Image (cartoon, grey):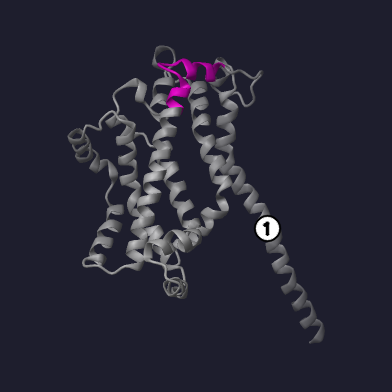
Amino acid sequence: MTLLSTRGDAATRRRPEAKRGIRPLVAGVLAALFAFPVVWTVIGSFKPFAEANASPPVWWPSELSFDSYEKLGGSSGSLWLYVTNSLMVTLMTVAITTVVATLGGYAFARFRFPGKGALFGLTVGMLLVPYPALLVSLFTVMIWFGLTNSLFGLALIYSTFQMPFAIYMMKNSFESIPGEIIEASEIDGCTPISALYRLLLPLVAPGMVTVALFAFLAGWNEFIAALVLLNDNAMFTLPIALVNAQSGPLNTIDWGALQAGITVTMMPCIVLFIALQKYYVSGLIAGAGK
């Protein structure tokens, strides 16, 4: 019996070790599967025209070529103009969304006012409405305010789309702060507003970073709203410019130019996500705590 018990204990100890050995392998395979499209796109952007559009595909370029990037920069305008437009819209979207969501989340979390529950439920309920269904109404509102074909008007639209989720995140971030901290600030003579910018903002910084990151990704990659609201080539954002740049001879798709544009588009998102990953994960955990 003692021998059987010893063998059983040894087998039990080997099982966790086997699991620990399998997990890195599975994680590596999944990481490779997710990274393959990104790597393939970047490599394809440096292929010569014939190799980028070859069928069957050429796995590795015979030489590094920047023709796709040159074409992207010279197609119906300047690449840097489109990048600048996208950057301006995205930064305005991030600023508007973060500021309004922080104030709104703080109000929902710390103040009592009539209709608070109904208003918050309506705000969260907007997440269930597909935003393309609102574009016609929003386009009419933009006409009334004279904000059509305007980067600022486009940023307002993007912020509107992001606001329900952003307010929800910030409300949960503020509610995750212990009440004793709020009471201590009141004892020290802080008003609700002074307590917000002196004490609470550093504590909800992960939530703010999460909101800002989501707003950046949405503003940088959004296509439909920009296509509807913009009609001047000088105002086009980068996603719209990619549609014009992908056209090859005889209305075929120039895969090299398209992959170059996708590479330019996704690199800021990848770099920003990696740089803010720690705060992003912390913000999601705080936001899911309620």
Q: Position of residue 218 (x, y in %)?
A: 41, 42
With 265 as the anchor, is 155 left or right in this view?
left
- Taking the spot 54% from the left edge, 42% from the top edge, the residue there is 272
- Taking the spot 55% from the left edge, 21% from the top edge, the residue there is 52
- Name the one closer to the observer, 128 or 289: 289
Q: Where is residue 261 in the image (x, y as percent from the top left)?
A: 49, 26
The relative height of residue 31 versus residue 189 in the rendered view (above or below) is: above
- Taking the spot 28% from the left edge, 69% from the top edge, the residue there is 112
Q: Give the range drawn in magenta.
A: 67-83
The residue that label 1 is drawn on is: 22
Q: Label 1 amino acid?
A: Ile
Neighbor class of circle 1 (other Cα within 10 Å; few <14, some 14-19, many 20+) is few
Q: Where is residue 268 in the image (x, y as percent from the top left)?
A: 53, 36
- Residue at the limit of the structure toward the top, as seen here: 250
**Magenta segment: does it hold 79?**
yes
Q: Where is residue 118 in the image (x, y as percent from the top left)?
A: 23, 64
Q: What element carries label 1?
A: helix
Magenta stretch: helix, strand or loop mostly: helix
The relative height of residue 230 versus residue 29 in the rendered view (above or below) is: above
State which quadrant residue 93 falls in.
top left
The relative height of residue 20 versus residue 211 in the rendered view (above or below) is: below
The answer to whether any part of residue 5 appears in the image is yes
With 245 as the anchor, is 48 left or right in this view?
right
